[in-house]
Image: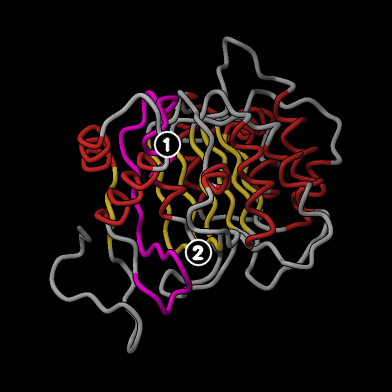
């Protein structure tokens, strides 16, 4: 039976599987007009860029999309350096938003897998680009193998990233890995704003393979009364200092919360409330163990 006679639902499933394994779509798109129409709907629903060239080409396009994308994914190799990547991402997201309305709903997921660089003069474009998105789910991870502890989000980029996230109203789930947070005075409560401001819609946060994460920033964010829907903060291989130091434990977050209370920096709560809140929300875990040295954990992977 010719593909053109298959029901649209069946043909859509077949084409979705074909696109998942075929980076070069031209041969499929040229089969006939029916397949082209269905293919465009599939491709535009789940936008995926596997190179800077693809991103730049899409961001420069003028033709309207056939639907509002449900997700946008950008994956760039670890060694790639493109100073205009976030300027192009902003234009790409603006193009995606032209079809968005109350009926289509917000962007379901924005996924990034790329490195930033300390000497990039255009890091401010991170905030410009991500502020356009306002997704329900956001993931930014490193492109290196999972057993590598490389830094994808450099400390100079964190401020711009957090500024964008703070402007989102739809965000529910955040996953950030391979992050070096800015180094602050450990008891400087302002450092909390380098983690996250209060976001009422936020439900879960996962921070994995992160260095220089202030335990006071975590405690201040978890205990912020504005985090009304926050259910879980997972800290996987999270270090308050360098990766040669000690991983963060839940008890560290509890103590930091009590310290903030004693300093008068947490209002309208008690010590018991802080302990209960941290116990119910914060999970500290071990995932990647080094061959030698560092904070080696035996037994349970949960750090109390």
Residue drawn 36% across the image and 65% down it: 237
Query: Is residue 19 visible from the viewing direction of this image?
Result: no
Q: Residue 243 magenta-drawn?
A: yes
Q: Nearer the viewer, residue 61 or 210?
A: 210
Residue drawn 74% across the image and 44% down it: 89
Disc number placed over residue 264 in the picture, else none: 1
Q: Nearer the viewer, residue 222 or 137?
A: 222
The residue furthest top is 103
Q: Main secondary structure of the magenta part?
A: loop
Residue drawn 57% across the image and 22% down it: 106
Q: Which comes sooner in the sequence, label 1 or label 2? A: 2
Which class describes the residues within 10 Å of circle 1: few (<14), some (14-19), or many (20+)? few
Q: Can you give x and y, in whole percent of width and height, for residue 164 in the image?
A: 65, 37
Q: Is residue 230 above or below residue 298?
A: above
Q: Residue 177 magenta-drawn?
A: no
The residue furthest bottom is 292
Disc number placed over residue 256 in the picture, else none: none
Which class describes the residues within 10 Å of circle 2: few (<14), some (14-19), or many (20+)? many
The quadrant the C terminus occupies is bottom left
Please give left or right for residue 271 compared with residue 180 in the image. left
Q: Can you give x and y, in whole percent of width and height, for residue 260 in the image?
A: 39, 43
Please give left or right for residue 267 compared with residue 119 in the image. left
Query: Is residue 188 visible from the viewing direction of this image?
Result: yes
Q: Which residue is mark 2?
A: 212
Secondary structure under the numbered disc 1 in the rendered image? loop
Q: Nearer the viewer, residue 23 or 163?
A: 163
The residue mark sitting in front, 1 or 2, is: 1
Q: Can you give x and y, in whole percent of width and height, for residue 110 in the image?
A: 57, 40
Secondary structure under the numbered disc 2 in the rendered image? loop
Q: Which region is colored magenta?
A: 219-246
Q: Quadrant of residue 32?
A: top right
């Amino acid at each position: 039976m010719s593909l053109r006679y298959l029901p649209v639902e069946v043909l859509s499933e077949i084409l979705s599987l074909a696109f998942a394994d075929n980076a070069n779509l031209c041969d499929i798109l040229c089969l006939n007009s029916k397949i082209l129409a269905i293919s465009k709907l599939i491709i535009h629903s789940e936008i995926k860029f596997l190179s800077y060239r693809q991103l730049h080409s899409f961001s420069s396009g003028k033709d309207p999309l056939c639907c509002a994308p449900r997700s946008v994914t950008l994956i760039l190799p670890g060694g790639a350096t493109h100073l205009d990547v976030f300027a192009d991402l902003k234009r790409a997201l603006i193009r995606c938003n032209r079809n968005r309305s109350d009926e289509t709903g917000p962007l379901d997921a924005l996924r990034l897998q790329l490195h930033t660089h300390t000497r990039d003069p255009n890091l401010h474009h991170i905030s410009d680009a991500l502020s356009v998105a306002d997704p329900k789910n956001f993931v930014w991870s490193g492109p290196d193998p999972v057993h590598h502890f490389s830094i994808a989000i450099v400390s100079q980029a964190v401020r711009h990233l957090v500024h964008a996230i703070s402007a989102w109203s739809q965000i529910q789930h955040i996953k950030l890995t391979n992050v070096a947070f800015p180094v602050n005075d450990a008891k400087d409560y302002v450092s909390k704003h380098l983690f996250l401001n209060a976001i009422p819609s936020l439900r879960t946060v996962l921070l994995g393979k992160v260095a220089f994460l202030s335990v006071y920033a975590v405690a201040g964010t978890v205990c912020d009364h504005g985090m009304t829907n926050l259910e879980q903060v997972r800290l996987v291989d999270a270090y308050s200092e360098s990766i040669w130091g000690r991983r963060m434990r839940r008890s560290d977050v509890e103590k930091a919360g009590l310290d903030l209370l004693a300093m008068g920096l947490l209002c309208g709560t008690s010590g018991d409330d802080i302990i209960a809140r941290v116990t119910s929300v914060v999970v500290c875990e071990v995932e990647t163990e080094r061959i030698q040295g560092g904070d080696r954990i035996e037994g349970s992977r949960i750090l109390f």
